[in-house]
Amino acid sequence: MVKRTLTILTTVLLTSAAGVSAAELKVDIPNIKLSGGISATGFNESKANNDGSSTNDIKLTDAVIELSGGDDFGGFDIAVGSLVTPTVIGSVDAENQGNFGLNRNNDKFGILWSYVSLTPIKGLQIDAGVLPTNVGYELAATYLNPNTTFGLVWNSQPFIYKGVRATYNVTDDIQVYGEYDRGSELNGYSKDHAFAVGSIGSIEDINYTFTYFDYGNYKNLVDFTLGYKYENVQFGVNGDYQWLDSDSSKKGYGIALYVIPEFDKVSLPVRVEYVKDKNGSGIYGFNDKGTYSFTVTPTYKFSDHTFVRAEYSYVKSNDKTAFNGSSHKGIASIQFAFTF
């Protein structure tokens, strides 16, 4: 599918340039946009080793270039680079990866996502290729999120995968969508296929998403997000409820609350989470024990495109041996990022 996407993109570029003299070569793709970012992060993680000791590391957390474009009939989106997915339960061990949509083999650099879009009728868009998920509050690159680390709730959600997604605009403010997905990157237990239906939009001043995501022959996920801004404070909520196909009593749920006060060049994002497995589901990995996390990320913006932020996250579980023999762990980090 990626080869086909690149072939279509190359054809569009060559066709657009046809008929133009060599001295005046130009490419005319409507609404072309180049964006991306790069970030580096230093981590100090407690309880990181088997003996309970701490570990330090510095990582290139993001290096992404994204090219997109299109018109009323369709378009494309392709991102290449490398991502780290550091979580509140494991940052130092997280590896740079590319080719998310193709495999999970820890490649250092590759295609992150790539898809073409078609608009066969007004209001309907069909995306096909390697897709970022619609599920959850947190996005693929760390610099796009309020916190450096990804949370407990994010850790059990889909991420990037091959698929086809159809989205229909019900109104100017409400969309509904359905998708069918393939590939081992969905989940190791999913039999390599999944489907999802959901809605994205806004009602009054509240932004929302709602999704039902079915991992084939493994588990089911109901996810929602809500977002609201009051004066200089942003609020967000992401909730999940999941259960296994083999036994619906084996389930889990999680909730994440985001509060982001902003003061000119300074912001103070806070994330509070709670997750719980039931009846040995293993969905969140804490042996049926409730687990919570607290993350605070003071951030200073040098400009609209450059920032530095410190972060401290603390995770506490009722599973007393969850983190190399301990019930808790902490991660401190500092990140520098540039976006464009």
Image: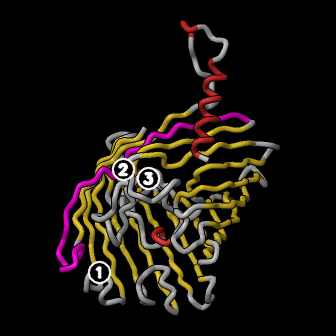
Q: CA distance from mark 3 to mark 1?
A: 26 Å
Can residue 136 be seen at all in this image of the molecule? Answer: no
* Furthest residue in direction right, as rendered: 121
Disc 3 residue crowd, few under 14, some 14–19, many 20+, Cα 10 Å: many
Q: Amino acid at mark 1?
A: Phe
Q: x, y percentage for residue 102?
A: 51, 54
* Depth check, front residue: 125 or 271: 125
What is the chief secondary structure element of the magenta stretch?
strand
Q: Which residue is mark 1?
A: 323
**Residue at 67 percent of width and 66 percent of height:** 195
Q: Quadrant of residue 199?
A: bottom right
- Residue 204 vs 49, above or below: the answer is above
Q: Secondary structure at mark 3?
A: loop
Q: Amino acid at mark 3?
A: Ala
Magenta stretch: residue 63 in it? yes
279 to the left or right of 289: right
* Depth check, front residue: 318 or 65: 65
Q: x, y percentage for residue 177?
A: 72, 58
Magenta span covers which residues? 47-72
Q: Disc 2 vs disc 1: which is toward the camera? A: 2
Q: Which residue is mark 3?
A: 141
| Label 3 vs 1, first from the N-terminus | 3
3 to the left or right of 204: left
